[in-house]
Image (cartoon, grey):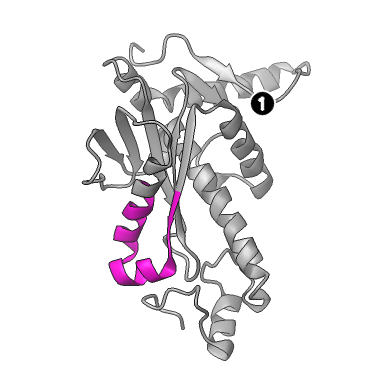
Amino acid sequence: MEKWPRNIKRASHKKGSNPVSPIQKYTLFWRALQLVLMLEYETRLWETGAQHVAGVDEAGRGALAGPVVAAAVILPHDTIIDGVRDSKTLTAAARTRAFDAIYEIALWVGVGQASPREIDELNVLKASLCAMERALERLGCKPDCLLIDGNRVLESVSCRQQAIIGGDRKSHTIAAASIVAKVVRDSLMRDLHKGYPSYGWNTNMGYPTQHHYEILKSAGPTLHHRLSFRLE
């Protein structure tokens, strides 16, 4: 219990509230408990005196086309944001609502990306780490500590860092970064779709699907495809 934040603030971007039933209250209680547990990593750092803890995550590593996008987010101390959890568990509409809430409540947000050509030249892991470094450069604040989704830290960044496997399910700040990265990348892919509508990037977001492979077989790759990936 001592690891839990002592003064959790529930941040919401919604106006007003509606009466809830006992069952809804019970559900909300357990949801809130899960969110409190998701601040465990942040709380440990705050209690050591860290002021600015940044969560870092990326989106698009497994796609065949488009950039890999990374985000870094710093939240106010002891704050949980309604609807923020692992981006992969949310619908597109829920991610958009959470994205808007993050930008309203977060202290700082930074986004970076690495292009398909950089992915081909560096490999997707190194390109993802490069995108994370660029997100931190655009953060507008030098963080005291980083919580990074995955098993790698950023060697070029000189601050305390912790890599957390499955971090978007364990850290609220990383979850916020995962949502920002996913929403920004999806928007980029929808824009790219306008120039290449046959590839279906407005729905598959550049990821491997049967339709995507079929179009690649008949029309070949575009300049936005990752040529180092298996495209057939």
What residue is shown with label 1? 13
Residue type, label 1: His
Q: Is residue 203 among what the camera can see?
A: no
Magenta segment: 112-132
The residue located at (61%, 55%) in the rendering is 187
Q: Is residue 104 left or right of residue 19?
A: left
Does the stretch in magenta take in 123? yes
Q: How many marks?
A: 1
**Residue, far bottom:** 218
**Screen quadrant of the N terminus:** top left
Q: Percent position (x, y) of residue 53?
A: 36, 28
The residue located at (30%, 22%) in the rendering is 45
Q: Is residue 145 left or right of residue 27?
A: left
Q: Is residue 137 among what the camera can see?
A: yes
Give residue 61's quadrant in the image: bottom left
State the residue in front, 101 or 27.
101
Give residue 214's quadrant in the image: bottom right
Regarding mark 1 in the picture, which secondary structure is present there? loop
Secondary structure character of the magenta stretch overall: helix
Q: Percent position (x, y) of residue 195?
A: 65, 73
Does the stretch in magenta take in 116? yes
Q: Percent position (x, y) of residue 124?
A: 34, 63
Q: Percent position (x, y) of residue 182?
A: 53, 50
Vertical relation: 204 (above or below) 210: above
Give residue 159's quadrant in the image: top left
